[in-house]
Image (spheres, coloured by chain):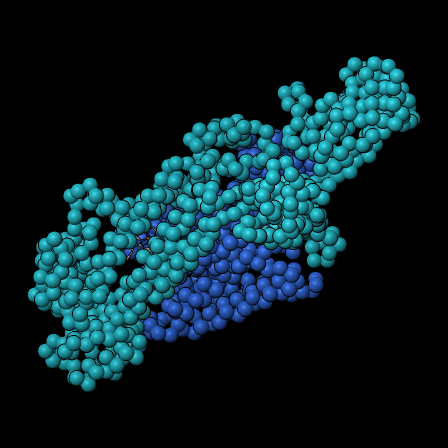
Amino acid sequence: MEKIKCECGHVNPEGTVLCEACGKPVEGNQHIDGNDKRKLLNMRYDGSARRSQTYNKSIIDKTWNFFSSVKVGVWLIVLALTASAIGTIFPQEQYIPADATQDPSIYYEAQYGILGQIYYQLGFHNLYGSWWYMLLIAFIGMSLVISSIDRFVPLYKTLKMQKPRRHDTFLKRQRLFSETEHVSSDEKKKLVSGLKKQRYKVWEDNGHVLAEKGRFSRWGPYVNHLGLIIVLIAALMRMTSFMYMDEYVWVREGEQTVIPGTDKEYYIENKDFILETYDKDDERFKNAIEKQGNVAKNYQTNAVIYKEQGDDVAGADPDLKKVTEDSIRMNEPLEFDGYTLYQSGYQQNEFKRMSFKIHKTDDPEEASLGSFSIDLTDPKETYQLDNGFQVGVTQYYPDYELQEEEPASKTPYPRNPAFVFTIHPPGNEEPETSFVGIGKNIDATGENDYKLGIEDFETRYASGLSVKRDYTLPLFIIGAVIFMIGVSQGMYWQHRRIWLHPKGEGILVAGHTNKNWFGLRQDIERMIADTNVNMVQDQQETE
Amino acid sequence: MDSLINVSSAMLYTAFILYLIATFFFGATIRDKNKNSNKGVGISGKIGITLTIIGFLAQIVYFITRWIASKHAPVSNLFEFMTFFGMALVFAFIILYFIYRLNILGLFALPIAIIVIAYASVFPTEVAPLVPSLQSNWLYIHVTTVSLGEAILSISFVAGLIYLIRQIDQSVRSKRTIWLEVVLLSIFIFAGFSIISTAFNVSGYSAEFEYSVNGTTQTTDYHLPPIAGPNEGELLTGDRMNPLFEAPGWMKGVDAARKFNTVIWSVITGLILYGLARLILRKRVGAFIQPFLLKAKPDMLDEISYRAVAIGFPVFTLGGLIFASIWAQEAWDRFWGWDPKEVWALVTWLFYAAFLHLRLSKGWHGEKSAWLAVGGFAIIMFNLVAVNLVLAGLHSYA
Ligand code: HEM
């Protein structure tokens, strides 16, 4: 590395544009910050030696320079922004209606025509999980890290090295500048005390003054980028199943079931599910409810959580100990031992028990010849009736529907139960087959002597709970907090510096800030109050 | 109870009128001759800001009384939300006014707030019960913070717009003058929507249609005469005009045709208003306003536009991304779900991040920066209006 020695005696690293100590432009390096073409100095990074502006030979240099360029960074941001927006034109795959019977490959075309088909074929229906979207985000992450290091390190050093005594070209080429011919030493003292009164930190060296305020605000961007990086890392970790577990469980009223994703360690019992709607007669909402119909007020599962004790002996009943008992409501999840349960769905009117009676097909009174009851969670193969009838359950469809002309069950849950029964009448009459469901009673042969009718049934709620364990949340929170600290410190404070430089009888005044020049001018106005020192000119306007 | 709601509505109305009057006082400051008085803001300016503050307080009273009456923070349907956004706009204007004391800002910021409030009042104003997912304090915190952030960012647009009108060369027609007219026209269209909807609402117009979506029969109630009717729909209400044409078949969403019809009406009304303005003024609207703005210093406008982003960006991040995530985590067990509304918050955020980087590192000041401020506002309005009405997601209020 070639060091550069300035006339003030300070030794600067290679690539320095303005001497770290006195701010004198380093000959031969002015093109780096574009100072050779302008009157004013580019003060963005105080003329410090940035790696990206100094080396451009090896492949490493070139990669570094690519990612540290703000131009590249902005392009990446604009691409991410555009892609994100495109993803909202049609719903993403996860948002197409759950009961859409169609496959996504058909759904998009059926719903949105040719545009929908193109959308699907380009993979935009799953845009945010696509490899190229993730790659884009990863590039933004790289860019954040590299561009921040590229600037932070040299800038930090330079601001540490700066001396109160600055070269006069440095002052003259600042945006805010003035020169005053005659200034008394009394007035000079007034300037300094004026600065101190405004809570500037003041360094003096033989009449040369550096007053500085809010340097910490200069680190704002680097702090906020750090926060963003932490968030991105957290998002990456969340893709692993160890850090993030996401399961779903249905549990029926009065039942108890193992909680998935907990290694069979935890069980949940649903004591009661409550669904409340708003009272139609409530004065407050009368008008709105009249207009839009009933509105749900509360979904709630009263749950008990148990933990398995001791070893899990295969086949043995689990030995359970109560962990907690509480209600789970929307916006009020239940937390226990690192897991969280969210009220996430419910199923109304799931059948629990159904009872049937047998009667003669040609009996208009439908007088009962005997009845039996099926526990739908555990249907038996045959039911023996008191009067000698025997009914066999040949087929059971818990959630019956016709799929391509064939009877089938849409889900394994008894939401629309249907049966194929075989009736063995007493004596040695021929067995008869019939199909019975809600509102359906089909006799395939048309010659049955007996008919089965639904006599009674019992329904209950099933509660859908999502089960999460997310170790990445704290990291997201830390990232977000750091980001907010960073943007606030960068946006609500500014790094202001004022230099005073004695020249003969008079004085040069210059000022620089990274933003809010209006505020800096006010500070300088207050500093020169009651003196005849000239107000600084904004040299950018006159340039 | 009812009386409290009445007080509340009266206060909102008062605020609306006060903002209107205040606009005229800010307008009068243009005629203030004492150009050299950089300090004081002049008597008209003082009256203007005083009226604005009184109006703002009236709107606070509206907000609090409605809160008490409905027992939840009134930010839970489109009417309440847009009204709150209007209030936040006024608040953001007051903050920036006291930093920079620029009267002309009021002349543009207040009308925008007025249009927003008028827009809000087109939606159902009944106090509505909250579905379980909306019963969360985090929701209120999220919604209020995000609209405050968006309001501050909107002031950046206001300053940017003034900058553009003042600076763009109007002596010849150019791409820039045309784009500027497009921006102004879209404000007319917005106003057109409020005017036409209010007019037909007052007259009580209603026409019911029956049509089918995915095989199920639905009805929809038009409050504006149907220029575009539902695809293969049938008019149920007697003695109403028949649609001039049917909405295209690919507009499938619930009520898509009705929304499309509303858009057509707004555009027509906006175009008529704009056309009248052009006829009366006999020049581009931008060219007409320009001479009134000569007193404003361009670099001051540029500074305000940037400062508003600097102040608004962190607030927006906090409300639109962070608080939003906390609420989503509590309500839907995931803090981020790529719901359209969430994505558009991200788009807004990325856009302003790009704005800041371009300004800081590429030196995009002045006109370029002003155009970006306009673009940012367009995205915000898209998120507030179009995403709610067109790309329905979990947040689809109304
Ligand atoms: C999407 C994410 C990003 C956000 C939210 C973000 C945010 C910010 C903010 C708020 C600032 C301060 C701006 C100001 O003070 O006006 C800043 C500065 C900066 N950002 Fe980013 N940034 C992002 C991505 C990037 C990327 C991808 C790069 C890559 C080149 C980058 C490079 C920089 C640089 C070089 C600065 C200036 C630092 C300085 O002057 O000290 N940022 N960023």
**Front-most of B59 and A444?**
A444
In the image, taking residue A125 as reference, residue B370 lies left or right, namely left
Q: Residue at x 60, y 39 (%)?
A: A313
Residue A56 visible in the shown view: yes
Image quadrant where residue A152 sits: bottom left
Residue B382 visible in the shown view: no
**Front-most of A276 and B367?**
A276
- Can you tell which chain is drawn blue? B
Image quadrant where residue A224 sits: bottom left
- Can you tell which chain is drawn cyan? A
In the image, taking residue A192 as reference, residue B113 lies left or right, namely right
Q: Whole-percent x and y of residue A374?
A: 77, 31
Quadrant of the image containing the N terminus of chain B: bottom right
Q: Whole-percent x and y of residue A55?
A: 16, 48
Q: Residue at x 20, y 78 (%)?
A: A533
Q: How many marks?
A: 0
Task: Work out whether A375 lies above or below A208.
Answer: above
Residue at the extreme left: A7
Q: Residue at x 66, y 20 (%)?
A: A406
Task: Work out whether A106 lies above or below A325.
Answer: above
**Front-most of B131 and A154?**
A154
Q: Whole-percent x and y of residue B221?
A: 65, 42
Task: Work out whether A129 lies above or below A211.
Answer: above
Q: Whole-percent x and y of residue B385?
A: 51, 48
**Front-most of A283 and B190?**
A283
Q: Residue at x 62, y 59 (%)?
A: B72
In the image, taking residue B109 as reference, residue A452 lies left or right, namely right
